[in-house]
Amino acid sequence: MIEFEFWYLLALPLLFAAGWLARGFESRARESDQAGLPRSYFRGLNLLLNDQHDKAIDAFIEVVKLDPETIELHHALGNLFRRRGEFDRAVRIHTHLLNRSDLPANARAQALVELGQDYLKGGLLDRAEDAFTRLLEDRHYRFDALRALLRIYQMEREWLKAVDCARLLEREAGESHNVAISHFFCELASTALEGGQFDQAHKAIDDALSADRKSVRALILAGDLAIKQGHGEQALRQWQRVEAASPQHLPLIAARVADAMDAAGDRAGATNWLRRALLDTPSIDLLDVAQKRLNDWEGHVAAEALVGEELRRHPSLLGFERLLETRLATNKDDAELQLLTSLLRAQTRKLARYRCTRCGFRAREYHWNCPGCTGWDTYPPRRIEEIDAA
C-alpha cells in the first residue's frame, strides 16, 4: 500500500507537466489559426466602413479562399448589399460562390437561392426565373423556389404559369391558393373581354368559379360578359348574386346595375334600387353613383336632397364634400362656396383612399391585387374614413 502511494505521488508532476504542454500547444495552434484571418477580415471590414465596397468584396473573397467556412460571411454581406439596393454587388458575391468548383452541393443551392433573390429584388425577372427553375430539382429548396416562381409569374402576368405553380404548391406543400388561382383566371377573362374573345372569357370565368365559388370578381366579370353579348337580364342576375354573396361589394357593381336597368327602360326601378342599397349598405362610393345618376336623371335638386338625407344618416367629411359639390353645381358664382369646397377637398384627399388590410398600402383606386404586398382580396371596398369610423 505504501509503495503504491509513492509511485502515485511521482506521477502527479508528470501529469501536470503533460497538461501544461498540451495547453501550450493548443494555445499556439489557436493563435496560428487566427493569425492569417484577421488581416483579411479586418481589412475587409475597414474597407466596408470606409464605403470602399468593391475592395471590401475583394478582401472577403480572399477570406473565402483561405477558409471555406466563411461562406456565411459572404451571404451576410450579400444580404446587406441587397437590402441597401446595391444588387450588382450582391450578385457579384453570390456569383463568385457559384463559380467555386469545390463548393458543397447544399452550399451551392443556398448561393443559387440568394442569387435568385438578388435578381428578383433588382427587377431582372428572367434571370431570377432561371435561377429558381434550376432549384426545382433540389428537394430542400423546391417549395421556396416554387413560391418565388409564383411571385415572378404574377409580376410578369404569366397567369397560366402562375396557375400551374400554385397548383403544384397545393398538391405538394399542402398550401391553399384557391383565391389566387381564381384571380389568375379572372385576369385572363378580363384580357379576353377587352379583346372581344367571348368564348375564352367565358371559359376563364368558369375556371375562376371552379377554383373559388365565392369569387365576387368572377361574378362581376360574368355580368360584364353578358352585357357585352347583349344579355342585360342575365347580367343583372349575375350581379344580384354579388349582392347576395357579398353586400360590401355593392359599390363595385352599383353603376353597372343602375345603367343596365336604365337601358332596359326601368329608370324608376334603378333609382329605387340605388336608394335601397344606400339604406342597406351605406357607402361613399355608392353615394357617388347615386348622386351622379339622380343628377342626370332628375336634376341637381333631387341629387342634393339625396346627399343631404344620406349625410344626416351617416355624417362624414367625404359626404359633406359631396354635398358642397352638388350645391356648387347650381351656384358656380359663389366664391365662398368654391373656397370651402377646395379647402375641404384638400383635407379629405387622404381619407378618400383605399387601404390594404395586410400591409396598409393606400391607393386612390380599388385594387384586387395589392401593389404593396401583392396580396389578393386585401382591399375592403370602403374608403379609409368609413373603415376608421366603423
Image (cartoon, rainbow, N blue to C red):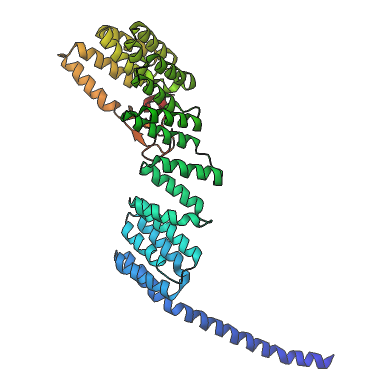
**x and y percentages locating residue 216 in the rendered image:** 44, 26
| Residue 135 pos. (x, y %) | 46, 56
Compare residues 100 and 82 and report the one nearer the observer. Answer: 100
Q: Residue at x 38, y 60 (%)?
A: 78
The correct choice, above or below, for 362 with respect to 12 in the image is above
For the residue pair 58 and 154, the one nearer the viewer reads as 154
Q: Which residue is drawn at the image coordinates 40% and 71% (left, top)?
A: 41
| Residue at the extreme front | 199
Q: Visible in this render: residue 315?
A: no
Which residue is at a point 37% across and 40% down the rendered structure image?
372
- Split into 4 quadrants, where in the image is the N terminus? bottom right
- 116 or 375, which is in the foreground? 116
| Residue 298 appears anywhere in the view | yes
Q: Relative to 158, say whether 62 is above or below.
A: below
Please state, as top left, top right, bottom left or bottom right, where the C terminus lies in the image.
Answer: top left
x, y percent for residue 242: 45, 21
Q: Which quarter of the figure has residue 319?
A: top left
The picture places residue 313, in percent across and down from the top left corner, at 39, 13
Residue plotted at (41% across, 39% down): 359
The answer to whether 325 appears left or right of 316 in the picture is left
